Image: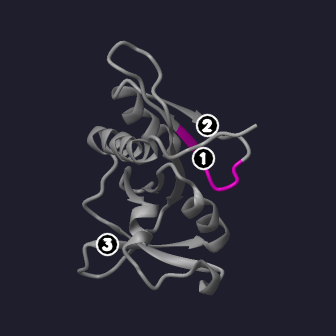
Amino acid sequence: MSVNHVERFVLRCGYTVERIVHDYGIDLALSTYSAGGEIENGQVYVQLKATDRLRLRGDQPTIAFSVPRVDLELWLREPFPCILIVYDARADVAYWLYLQAYFGQFANFSLAEAGETVTVYLPRENIVDEAAIRRFAHYRDDVLAQMRGVIHHYD
């Protein structure tokens, strides 16, 4: 249900997702297309988690969710955006968190010092919809803009 929930918004935007069959911390790879229908460079990676019981932080505007450190190692070393999506099956709503940007705000965060799991806090206002999917594409575009002229490929 969580994959279907996200795919519906992706398709409405005119984009596609590829399901990663062997899940190693990434469930979907999002591809976008130009107005002319040509595929665009780069991808957005999505990790989906579904639950029947969201851990709400009382009156706080966030949802607490624990993620394995091993997955964080993959996501935080990935140059393209990695988005964690937590799907609330009871309410049929999903929330998202741009992982690299989230951890980038913590100057003292160290993967080496993290425990087996790390709790992240997803803003309740970050609801997955068409606007969110387009925003993910903009995050990817921002990464591509930073990469121009920097990468050298050698034989």
Give coordinates of residue 67: x percent, y percent. Answer: 56, 70
Cα–Cα gap, marks 2 and 1 = 6 Å
Q: Earlier in the sequence, mark 2 or mark 1?
A: 2
- In this image, 137 relative to 82: left or right? left
Q: Which residues are the magenta region? A: 23-29
Report the residue at 30% width, 57% height from top: 126
Kind of residue at disc 2: Arg
Cα–Cα gap, marks 1 and 3 = 23 Å
Report the residue at 36% width, 74% height from top: 105
Q: Which residue is mark 3?
A: 62
Q: Residue furthest top?
A: 36
Is 25 covered by the magenta stretch?
A: yes
Report the residue at 36% width, 12% height from top: 36
Assess whether mark 1 and mark 2 are in contact (beta carbons under 8 angstroms). Answer: yes
Q: Which residue is mark 2?
A: 19
Cα–Cα gap, marks 3 and 2 = 28 Å
